[in-house]
Image (spheres, grey):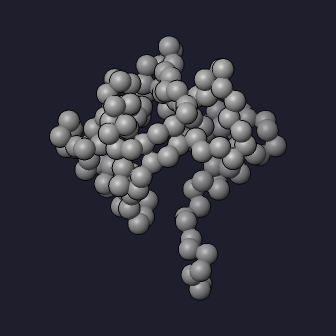
């Protein structure tokens, strides 16, 4: 599956000095990592992707609808190789994210409220800073 995705990236002009790796504990979990023998300088470009290689929309809702539509197209979607590497919502790696924890588990975190504050920040509606309210 990685090979198909990496070939798709090359065809679309997406490049990175990073290596795509997977987790032995959760086959659906993939991540990019710098090879051990490389040193990335601060400010280095880690991913270059032409805009026409990206799924974009003007709103989060529109983007969600676009992703859902592309997923519904299955293998006929031009984004299928990318969508195929995304983890499923019921995968262990996704379930491990605090956003999906039960309230009791969230309540047991003793980090001075940092996790809760970050989750609240992530849930804030995106507001145009130039919008007069």
Q: Residue at x 82, y 43 (%)?
A: 112
Judging depth in this view, the residue of 74 and 61 nearest the camera is 74
Q: Residue at x 69, y 30 (%)?
A: 39
Q: Residue lying farthest top?
A: 24
Q: Quadrant of residue 99?
A: top right
Picture coordinates of residue 93 (x, y %)?
51, 27
The quadrant of the image that shows the C terminus is bottom right
In the rendered image, which quarter is residue 72 located in? top left
At a point 51% along the width and 37% down the height, the residue shown is 16
* One can see residue 8 in this view: yes
Can residue 61 be seen here? The reply is no
Q: Where is residue 90 drawn, in percent x and y? A: 41, 29
- 78 versus 122 height, above or below: above
Give the answer, above or below, for where 84 lies relative to 57.
Answer: above
Number of dots carrying numbers: 0
In this orientation, which residue lies closer to the viewer: 79 or 38? 38
Q: Quadrant of the N terminus?
A: top left
Residue at 51% over, 15% down: 25
């Amino acid at each position: 599956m990685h090979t198909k995705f990496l070939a798709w990236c090359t065809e679309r002009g997406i490049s990175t000095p990073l290596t795509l790796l997977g987790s032995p504990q959760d086959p659906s979990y993939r991540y990019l990592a710098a090879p051990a023998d490389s040193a990335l300088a601060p400010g280095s470009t880690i991913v270059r992707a032409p805009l026409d290689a990206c799924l974009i929309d003007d709103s989060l809702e529109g983007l969600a609808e676009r992703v859902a539509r592309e997923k519904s197209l299955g293998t006929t979607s031009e984004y299928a190789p990318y969508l195929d590497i995304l983890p499923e919502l019921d995968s262990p790696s996704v379930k491990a994210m605090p956003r999906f924890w039960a309230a009791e588990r969230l309540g047991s975190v003793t980090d001075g409220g940092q996790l809760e504050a970050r989750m609240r920040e992530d849930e804030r509606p995106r507001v145009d800073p130039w919008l007069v309210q």
